[in-house]
Amino acid sequence: MNYHKYYPIDVVNGPGTRATLFVSGCEHACRGCYNQSTWKLDSGHLFDDAMAQRIIDDLNDTRIKRRGLTLSGGDPLHPQNVDAILALVTRVREACPGKDIWCWTGYTLETLSDEQLQVVELIDVLIDGKFEQDLADPSLLWRGSSNQRVHHFNEKATS
Ligand code: SF4
């Protein structure tokens, strides 16, 4: 897996102060996508073990307290990203107790493969669906268009 950007401190992609990873690779090609540079799987930088460890260290940093990890892109659930994302969320779950994980995807929950659902089982919040320009609404919280949905799997991660 490749990633485009990593923000060790982020306050706009999910609630509270977070660490946010934007992965490379997206096959949805939404009209009006604000992140087209992330579409190619081989764009950006290699996501390696050192990067995963950096994220874990940042989440456990007691000087700047992060509420959790945000996964965005690109699409973290792109079939070619799922293995690496599953490994990452498994590690974060083990190494960062109390941190929440939010994930944005262009797929809808009902269409996810078993492997993609393994990721969903380990996260707290999934925002799903393509960005639909005709349904865009800047007043929506955490969503760009009204067809997208915010699925909460953990009440503590709902705000
Ligand atoms: S799912 Fe997101 S990154 Fe992919 S094309 Fe749509 S808006 Fe862009």
Image (cartoon, grey):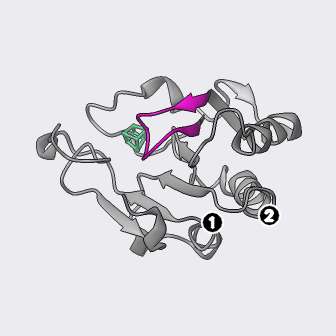
Determine which residue is flagged by label 1.
119
Q: x and y percent of residue 154 in the render?
A: 48, 72
Left or right, 132 with reference to 60: left
95 versus 117 height, above or below: above
Q: Which mark is residue 33?
A: none
Of circles 1 and 2, the one toward us is 2
> Of residues 108 and 88, which is closer to you in this image?
88
Amino acid marked by disc 1: Val
Q: Is mark 2 within 8 Å of ligand 1?
A: no
Left or right, 101 with reference to 154: right
Please tell me which of labels 1 and 2 falls first in the chain: 2
Left or right, 75 with reference to 15: right
Residue found at the very far right of the displayed protein: 49
- The residue shown at (73%, 37%) is 58
Residue found at the very far front of the displayed protein: 63
Determine which residue is flagged by label 2.
94
13 versus 148 height, above or below: above
- Pointer 1 local density, CA inside 10 Å: few below 14, some 14–19, many at least 20: many
Cα–Cα span, label 1 and label 2: 14 Å
Task: Assign ligand 1 to one image quadrant.
Answer: top left
Q: Quadrant of the N terminus?
A: top right
Residue 33 counted in the magenta span: no
- The residue shown at (39%, 57%) is 127
- The residue shown at (42%, 47%) is 15
Q: x and y percent of residue 144 in the render?
A: 26, 42
Asked which secondary structure carries label 2, the reply is helix
Q: Which residues are magenta?
A: 8-19
Q: x and y percent of residue 87 in the render?
A: 78, 58
Residue 13 counted in the magenta span: yes
- The residue shown at (32%, 47%) is 142
